[in-house]
Image (cartoon, rainbow, N blue to C red):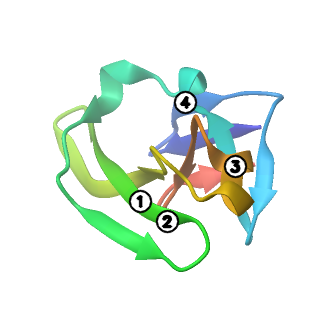
Amino acid sequence: MKASWNNIVIAESDDTVLVEGNYYFPESALKKEYVTFSNHKTSCAWKGQASYYSLLINGEMLTDAVWYYPDPKPEADMVRGRVAFGNAIKVA
């Protein structure tokens, strides 16, 4: 599977996990050269607190485009060490 934005591949892996319609890639598959800081956080009742990254590619910023659960609840352990992507990111 590949995750891309504006025809730039930002993550690629054969090891993805599908949870609630989102593909979670290993965090190591995320191309760190495109990742930038975000202090945004959200909460999921069963997964826990999500943290975010923004993307900066060719001078364009996509805010809060990538999320991850640094310490997921036990029932959501399948997303530990993985990242998922917002709707602007094409995953196929």
* Residue mark closest to the camera, 3 vs 4: 3
Which label sits in the foreground, 2 or 1? 2
Pinpoint residue 13: horizontal percent, then vertical percent.
Answer: 74, 27
Which amino acid type is marked by label 1? Ala
Identify the residue position indicated by label 1 in the image: 50
Q: Position of residue 19 (x, y in %)?
A: 75, 63
Q: Nearer the viewer, mark 1 or mark 3?
A: 3
Give amino acid for label 4.
Answer: Glu
Number of residues whose C-alpha sits closer than 10 Å to that of mark 1, classed few (under 14), some (14–19) or many (20 or more): some
Measured Cα–Cα span from mark 2 to mark 1: 7 Å
Q: At 74% from the left edge and 47% from the top edge, which residue is drawn?
A: 78
Name the quadrant containing residue 12: top right
Foreground tag (1 vs 4) = 1
At label 3, the amino acid type is: Asp
Residue 56 shows in this picture? yes
Nearer-N-terminus badge (3/4): 4
Tell me if mark 3 has few (under 14), some (14-19) or many (20+) residues whose alpha carbon lies within 10 angstroms of its own: few
Residue denoted by label 4: 27
Distance Cα–Cα, label 3 vs label 4: 14 Å
Number of the front mark, 4 or 2:
2
How far apart, in angstroms, are the residues tagged by discs 4 and 2? 17 Å
Is 69 on the left-hand or right-hand side of 42? right
- Measured as percent of width and height from the top left, residue 91 is found at 67, 51
Residue 10 lies, with reference to residue 24, above or below; the image says above
Q: Left or right: where does residue 21 sit relative to residue 65?
A: right
Circle 4 SS class:
helix
Mark 4 residue crowding within 10 angstroms, few (<14) / some (14–19) / many (20+)? some
Residue type marked 2: Gly
Residue corresponding to mark 2: 48
Helix, strand or loop under label 3: helix
Q: Are marks 2 and 1 in contact (CB under 8 Å)?
A: yes
Label 4 or label 2, whichever comes before in sequence order: 4
